[in-house]
């Protein structure tokens, strides 16, 4: 999904899971983001391949659990067991109704479908054992199924005896509460976290042999991690911390990082989330750090440690990578000197660095529904992508993000909800690794926007603009999309929230406009592509400013004698020739019609009298077709604040007036606002108390939708005169 604003990217999950998979390993160890201090000590040590392991492909795979003879992994389309000795695999069939679970530290895989649980012994082979049970499978410990009776919330250990009968043992001694979370550990003991409304969270250790709770620990909060070894129990007392308790003496300590006991119980395996900090040392990237429980020495291994799984023989399997070897699966073990080393046993055949292989950005954008999406190919599926497009002529930009999708779609806006200008653009795509390890990948290129123009477009982006003169005489075009976005709520925090504009950024069209006492934008009166602007100076001379892309051309004189008029307005095509026309009321209250010619040298025909009595109105605006008649329409506000609608007949005249409603005296300016998605003209009204957008309904009885109120107010400085 694409947004035209910058935020920290949320990154996609790595694997597209085709089957439901419950990971029962210790899982990824997310450590704390504690204070950064010194530089890292030493480089990662890498051992040569161990004699008992083959190096096999580990492509597009996610480690789940590991046993002494092999490991379980999730791939894009299947679940597979791989043997260390020769890399041979057993593939489990994909099925939407089947859940696969491994047993931490054991060579067991269980396939569950409904009440049927099939236990596969991956080390010894043989016929799988089928266990039918009405309970819900929550964990696998060795070949024993750890299950919950969903009706009673009681815990059961279910297995099949050598004689073939199903053995169902209810666990005794459980603390009060509902079994909440189960943690894989070495075969023989199950760690279960329970929750009760009045007694909080508890961690119960269940002995599989006796089906009895042998130890219970009170927790201050929910723990996202737990580990049980013969001598210790570990859990997470707070995010990024580890509580270690000696099971015999009950002596406890809290460590300021996420860790598990490994390598025969003499080492802590430490990993981190945003960064890895151990004893005041911050390690670069996201390695796994092995810390000796005997002498305190620390050995960092790998540049990225993603998932850590105990093997059951004292070693660890880690999916991750190094910049030297690339991504893969590594075994952490002790060398002959007793120092932890890492050995690649599974080759991911992919560099650890982020690489953008290909980027596809359209050569041209029209924003007419035919534009292709921006796509890319990268060497890593877990990434965040930003795309920044910069308009060459103005330097205005837009930054788009992809958080979950594999594409970016540009909605046609720049930052601040300004419509993208026509012309040349440069683009820059940046791919951020989801792991946070290594530099981002960057590609650049060019594209163009060719979206044409639209009524009231003065900055060449096919969006209607409000023309505003400030107290210094600067004339600016404010994209009405920006003004509309000022009314969006800042309280929305979900994906897809409409952007909010607090301080609209205009395009300055010129200076010195304080010389004019009346101004109007009658439309394309001089034959160019874009709408034009006219202004009457203090001497009564009317001047023409033709629009040219994002600027106004030097003025040309139309003629004198215009000081007889108190109001001028334009924008509606009153005679059906496809060009906007001009209306003016004189001091006697007579309304005059000036048809445009399309000739810059003489942009208007001789005036035609429409009628008298227009002196009762103190504001006129000609927004175009708002009520479905054949010609452009006219709105007039009387001195009591009542707004009246005059339907254009298409011949320069109007039907009898229709009352729109009262209360319009709160506005100092009412201006055309382009056309809505139905092709009907809108208006924008602003005053000292606020502003509103009124969307045309193509109806003579109720010409506008209810006001879409906006916070912008007119003032005596920046937002002084609108037309």
Image (spheres, rainbow, N blue to C red):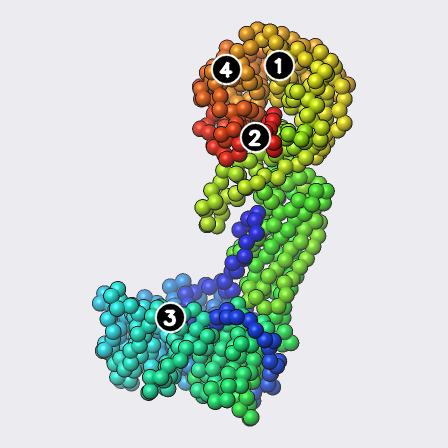
Quadrant in the rendering for residue 189 = bottom left
Mark 3 = which residue?
223
Q: Give neighbour class at mark 4: few <14, some 14-19, many 20+ (Cα, 10 Å).
A: some
Labels 3 and 4 touching (C-beta < 8 A): no
Q: Residue at x 66, y 59 (%)?
A: 442
Counting residues from the N terminus, which is met first, the one under dot 2 or under dot 3?
3
Q: Secondary structure at mark 3?
A: loop
Counting residues from the N terminus, which is met first, the one under dot 1 or under dot 4?
1
Mark 1 = which residue?
566
Label 4 and label 2: CA atoms lie apart by 21 Å
Whole-percent x, y for residue 213 in the image:
26, 80
Q: In front of the other: label 2 or label 3?
A: 2
Taking 386 as reference, is 128 above or below it?
A: below
Q: Secondary structure at mark 2?
A: loop
Counting residues from the N terminus, which is met first, the one under dot 4 or under dot 2?
4
Mark 4 = which residue?
639
């Amino acid at each position: 999904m694409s947004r035209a604003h910058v935020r920290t990217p949320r990154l996609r999950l790595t694997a597209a899971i085709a089957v439901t998979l419950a990971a029962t390993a210790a899982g990824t160890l997310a450590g704390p983001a504690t204070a950064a201090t010194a530089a890292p000590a030493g480089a990662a040590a890498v051992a040569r391949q161990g004699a008992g392991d083959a190096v096999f492909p580990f492509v597009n795979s996610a480690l789940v659990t590991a046993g002494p003879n092999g490991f379980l992994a999730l791939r894009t389309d299947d679940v597979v067991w791989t043997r260390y000795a020769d890399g041979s695999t057993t593939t489990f069939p994909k099925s939407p109704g089947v859940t696969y679970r491994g047993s931490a530290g054991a060579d067991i895989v269980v396939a569950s479908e409904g009440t049927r649980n099939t236990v596969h012994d991956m080390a010894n082979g043989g016929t799988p054992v089928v266990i039918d049970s009405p309970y819900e499978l929550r964990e696998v410990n060795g070949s024993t199924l750890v299950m919950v009776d969903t009706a009673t919330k009681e815990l059961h250990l279910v297995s099949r005896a050598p004689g073939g009968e199903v053995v169902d043992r209810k666990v005794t001694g459980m603390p009060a509460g509902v079994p909440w979370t189960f943690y894989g550990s070495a075969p023989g003991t199950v760690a279960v976290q329970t929750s009760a409304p009045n007694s909080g969270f508890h961690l119960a250790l269940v002995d599989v042999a006796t089906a009895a709770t042998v130890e219970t620990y009170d927790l201050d909060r929910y723990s996202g991690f737990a580990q049980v070894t013969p001598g210790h129990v570990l859990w997470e007392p707070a995010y990024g911390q580890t509580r270690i308790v000696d099971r015999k003496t009950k002596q406890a300590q809290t460590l300021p990082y996420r860790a598990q006991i490994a390598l025969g119980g003499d080492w802590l395996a430490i990993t981190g989330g945003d960064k890895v900090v151990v004893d005041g040392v911050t390690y670069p990237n996201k390695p796994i750090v092995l810390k000796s429980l005997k002498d305190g020495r620390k050995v960092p291994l790998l540049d990225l440690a993603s998932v850590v799984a105990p093997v059951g023989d004292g070693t660890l399997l880690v999916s991750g990578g190094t910049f030297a070897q690339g991504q893969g699966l590594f075994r952490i073990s002790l060398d002959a000197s007793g120092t932890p080393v890492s050995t690649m046993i599974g080759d991911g055949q992919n560099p650890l660095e982020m690489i953008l292989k290909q980027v596809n950005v359209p050569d041209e954008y029209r924003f007419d529904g035919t534009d292709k999406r921006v796509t890319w190919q990268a060497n890593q599926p877990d990434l965040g992508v930003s795309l920044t497009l910069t308009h060459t002529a103005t330097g205005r930009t837009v930054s788009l993000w992809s958080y979950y999708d594999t594409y970016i779609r540009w909605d046609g806006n720049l930052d601040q909800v300004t419509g993208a200008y026509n012309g040349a653009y440069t683009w820059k795509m940046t791919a951020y690794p989801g792991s946070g390890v290594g530099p981002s990948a960057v590609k650049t290129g060019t594209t163009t926007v060719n979206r044409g123009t639209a009524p009231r477009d003065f900055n060449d982006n096919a969006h209607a603009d409000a023309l505003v003169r400030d107290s210094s005489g600067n004339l600016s075009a404010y994209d009405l999309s920006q003004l509309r976005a000022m009314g969006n709520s800042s309280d929305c925090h979900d994906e897809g929230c409409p952007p909010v504009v607090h301080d609209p950024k205009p395009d300055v069209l010129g200076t010195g406009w304080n010389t004019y006492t009346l101004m109007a934008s009658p439309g394309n009166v001089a034959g160019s592509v874009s709408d034009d602007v006219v202004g009457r100076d203090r001497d009564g001379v009317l001047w023409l400013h033709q629009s040219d892309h994002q600027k106004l051309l030097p003025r040309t004189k139309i003629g004198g004698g215009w000081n007889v008029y108190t109001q001028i307005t334009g924008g509606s095509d009153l005679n059906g020739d496809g060009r906007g026309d001009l209306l003016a009321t004189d001091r006697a209250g007579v309304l005059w019609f000036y048809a445009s010619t399309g000739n810059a040298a003489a942009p208007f025909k001789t005036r035609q009298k429409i009628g008298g009595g227009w002196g009762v109105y103190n504001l006129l605006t000609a927004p175009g077709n708002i009520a479905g008649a054949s010609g452009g329409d006219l709105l007039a506000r009387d001195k009591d604040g009542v707004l009246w609608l005059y339907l254009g007949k298409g011949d320069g005249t109007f039907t009898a007036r229709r009352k729109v409603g009262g209360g319009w005296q709160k506005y100092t300016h009412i201006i055309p606002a382009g056309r809505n998605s139905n092709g009907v003209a809108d208006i924008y009204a602003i005053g000292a108390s606020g502003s509103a957008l009124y969307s045309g309904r193509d109806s003579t009885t109720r010409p506008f939708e209810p006001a879409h109120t906006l916070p912008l107010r007119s003032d005596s400085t920046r937002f002084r005169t609108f037309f």
